[in-house]
Image: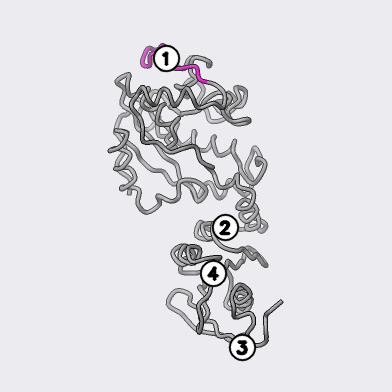
Amino acid sequence: MAPEIIEKPQVIALFSQGLDSILAIKIIQQQGLKVQAVKFITPFFGYEIKGRELEFCEKIKTVYAIDLTIIDLTENYLKMLSAPQYGYGKNFNPCLDCKIMMLNQARILAEKRQAESIVTGEVVGQRPFSQRRDTMRRIEKLSLTEGLLLRPLSAKLLTPTRAEETGLINREQLFDFSGRGRKPQIALAKKLKITDYPTPAGGCLLTDPGFAKRVKTLYQGTSIPAAEDLNLLKYGRFYPFESSSFVIVGRNRDDNQQLLTTAAENHFTLHLAEMAGPVAILKGEKEHLAFAAEKLCLHSKAKELGSVKINWRQGDESGSLTLEGSLKK
């Protein structure tokens, strides 16, 4: 569980753990305001902290003196992903709907806790679509955060928010950063003595072409994939079949370990009974075990044997099957 949030923060801040969001929060904290940071997670971003939220929040508090809480958007996010109102980006990424969803949640929290502003680390022009001025204004309108949403790093390039107009936040202490360059942020971090921050990374997995293609496959039917299934797609060789069923075969020892750790009770786990080899995970029915076993053997030395025994397990149930005939292609 994440720590309880501040009862009456003056500002709610979206926290990505990137340098920009850290700077945005520190800028506001320097004005003596009480800030509650929020980190949203889904299977596509931030999910590595699932199950250890308290530990993560305590670390952020220790390193940055930022009060943080975690909000898991998975259930609503997976529904939205099936048909985002504003469409997908280059891959299977619903960037506009995603930002609107997070800001809506932040707005609801701000209303509940009587906060007077919502802060993000966005910089005008840093991203080619979602951080264009016109898109930023559109997101404000669609998320009902006009006048409430403040971007401290680019505030002087944007219309003043209510918190600036009332004097709660001093606009003169905000910035006019723009573009994709990182030098102004790095210089500000040095000035604020912030040295421990991650380098820019890939962010949302849905922007990765290979992973996005896998996820899209599971959305071909009418059902919404489970988070447990989507987490498996991050590893191994992927073989989809029928209605949202699939087999994943580990490529190496790390893959095998990740698959075993990630598999849920409803997944079948398969491995060779009499020799070392990869692990396979089946999302499907018991009648699909032979198909999964064949994929497992194809990526092992067992493909050259005339008879191969494979052990399987699903929850508390286990068994074995034997494939006859060489699988060598």
Q: Residues within 10 Å of mark 4 (few under 14, many from 20)?
A: many
Q: The disc labelled 3 sits on which kind of residue?
A: Ser
Residue type at tag 4: Ile
The outermost residue toward the right is: 329
Relative side of 124 to 71, left or right: right
The reply to whether the magenta stretch includes residue 238 is no
Residue beneath disc 3: 307
Q: Nearer the viewer, mark 4 or mark 3?
A: 3
Q: Write down the residue under mark 1.
A: 164
Q: Are marks 4 and 3 in contact (CB under 8 Å)?
A: no
| Magenta portion: prevailing SS class | loop
The part of the chain drawn in magenta is: 164-177
Q: Earlier in the sequence, mark 3 or mark 2?
A: 2
Name the mark on residue 225.
2
Q: What residue is pinned by disc 4?
A: 281
Instruction: Inspect the image, locate mark 2, and give the three-letter code of the amino acid beneath it.
Output: Pro
